[in-house]
Image (cartoon, helix red, strand yellow):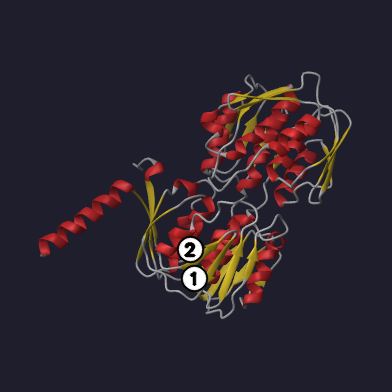
């Protein structure tokens, strides 16, 4: 029986090259808001191809506490949600603190029931992510907002009213929450300086399929005409552009032979990454829904990469890009402009031999270094992926701890990579400790 998942580790044997085909799962960052949108209707909502990630399970537990019922289909990826009998309106700290996206229940609860009490959010420790953008937007819609003992108390007993608002910054979760809050608001709501991410377009598409009137998603101005009711829907979330980007970078770093083909990709969602790699000399073959990465080769150029809101280079691929750039032979720089604490993976990569130097918001990378396997620790979701990538090309064995970060956003990652030729084994801390003790005993006895 598997040990406590919070005690799982990944053991990565370096030097095993990758070749074959890998398929991208549906996006976690699309699935979570779509799940919350099910709170807006009494009718069943069916989501297909949903990965059973830790974050998905956490949100289901939270919504079940509100009164939502759910059921997984026999295929293990079809999710039936029914919010007909919501009886509570509080999202507790114990669950919201585990995952920032839990705050996405705030808008739907407020829109449909006129009340919501939601703990201030948690999630990855990658820097401050204030909710002021959301709360100010809800107040513009006529909600009364109070912060009491770490909880957001939102009420709109007479309903929300359409408003014209300009967000101070294009916050993704804030935009999604305000979209869902506004679907039942009387009149027209206009959200200016809205986030433009593909996941927002996906949410708007599903809301429209349910009977809402949302226009402009994918641009910086979104308009919502209020309606009185939404219907049930069957919908498939879009593919995960961050998982796709991770696989593209991993293949460019460790591919061999005929290379690696990544399927279920929307290439334009990763255009910023594709442009950088092609400029570096990676000869990608981009299809309508796939990207083929040829066998890895030494690249003599470096890159200057700046994280930006979509359609710029995503902060969620910054750590993976850093791992990749350690293997080019040029000098590179990554500038992080979204989160102030998103270089926490740097010391772990340095433990493996990477030559990195942090200077404020920038990290200087001296490429062409030979990485060596080492015990390392995941500090957040995307950092964990970068350490897996580094372990694949490192000499020897890498032991990655705090794998629960990885399981929040990558579905069966080791299984997918092993199918390409990697050698990654999931073990418990107890197993690894016992193996290490046995090895020490053999060494001692040999002496």
Q: CA distance from mark 1 to mark 2?
A: 8 Å
Q: Quadrant of the C terminus?
A: bottom left
Q: Nearer the viewer, mark 1 or mark 2?
A: 2
Residue carrying label 1: 254
Q: Nearer the viewer, residue 382 or 286?
A: 382
Judged left or right of residue 314, residue 211 is: right
Q: Say which quarter of the image contains residue 280.
A: bottom right
Q: Residue at x 40, y 62 (%)?
A: 351
Judged left or right of residue 161, residue 354 is: left
Q: Earlier in the sequence, mark 1 or mark 2?
A: 1
Residue carrying label 2: 389
Q: Residue at x 57, y 30 (%)?
A: 62
Which residue, as the protein is rendered here, is positioned at the far front?
360
- Secondary structure type for disc 2: helix
Q: Nearer the viewer, residue 359 or 3?
A: 359
Q: Is residue 330 above or below residue 228?
A: below
Q: Residue at x 13, y 60 (%)?
A: 444
On the image, the x and y values in percent for residue 115 come to 70, 22
Q: Is residue 195 above or below residue 182?
A: below
Q: Say which quarter of the image contains residue 181.
A: top right
């Amino acid at each position: 029986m598997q040990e406590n998942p919070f005690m799982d580790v990944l053991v990565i044997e370096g030097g095993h090259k990758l070749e074959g085909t890998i398929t991208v799962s549906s996006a976690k960052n699309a699935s979570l808001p779509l799940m919350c949108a099910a709170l807006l209707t009494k009718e069943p909502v069916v989501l297909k191809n949903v990965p059973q990630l830790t974050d998905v399970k956490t949100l289901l537990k939270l919504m079940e506490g509100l009164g939502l019922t759910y059921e997984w289909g026999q295929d293990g990826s079809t999710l039936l949600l029914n919010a007909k009998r919501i009886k509570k309106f509080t999202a507790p700290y114990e669950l919201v603190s585990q995952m920032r996206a839990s705050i996405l229940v705030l808008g739907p609860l407020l829109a449909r029931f006129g009340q919501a009490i939601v703990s201030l959010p948690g999630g990855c420790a990658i820097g401050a992510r204030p909710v002021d953008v959301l709360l100010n937007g809800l107040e513009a819609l006529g909600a009364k907002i109070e912060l009491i003992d770490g909880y957001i108390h939102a009420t709109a007993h007479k309903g929300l009213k359409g408003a014209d608002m300009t967000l101070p910054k294009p916050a993704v979760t804030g935009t999604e929450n305000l979209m869902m809050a506004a679907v039942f608001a009387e009149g027209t709501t206009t959200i200016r300086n809205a986030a433009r991410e593909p996941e927002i377009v996906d949410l708007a598409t599903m809301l429209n399929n349910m009977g809402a009137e949302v226009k402009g998603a994918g641009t910086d101005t979104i308009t919502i005409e209020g309606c009185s009711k939404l219907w049930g829907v069957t919908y498939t979330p879009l593919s995960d552009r961050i998982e796709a980007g991770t696989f593209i970078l991993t293949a460019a770093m460790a591919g061999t032979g005929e290379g690696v083909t990544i399927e279920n990709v929307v290439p334009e969602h990763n255009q910023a990454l594709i442009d950088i790699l092609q400029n570096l000399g990676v000869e990608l073959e981009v299809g309508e829904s796939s990207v083929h990465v040829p066998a890895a080769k030494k690249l003599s150029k470096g890159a200057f990469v700046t994280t930006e809101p979509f359609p710029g280079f995503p902060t969620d691929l910054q750590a993976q890009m850093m791992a990749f750039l350690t293997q080019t032979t040029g000098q590179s720089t990554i500038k992080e402009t979204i989160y102030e604490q998103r270089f926490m993976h740097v010391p772990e990569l340095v433990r493996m031999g990477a030559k990195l130097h942090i200077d404020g918001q920038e990290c200087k990378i001296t490429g062409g270094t030979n990485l060596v396997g080492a015990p390392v620790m995941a500090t957040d979701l995307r950092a964990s992926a970068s350490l897996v990538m580094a372990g694949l090309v490192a000499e020897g064995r890498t032991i990655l701890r705090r794998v629960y970060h990885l399981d929040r956003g990558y579905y069966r990652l080791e299984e997918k990579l092993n199918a390409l030729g990697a050698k990654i084994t999931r073990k418990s801390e107890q197993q690894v400790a016992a193996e290490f003790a046995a090895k020490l005993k053999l060494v001692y006895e040999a002496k």
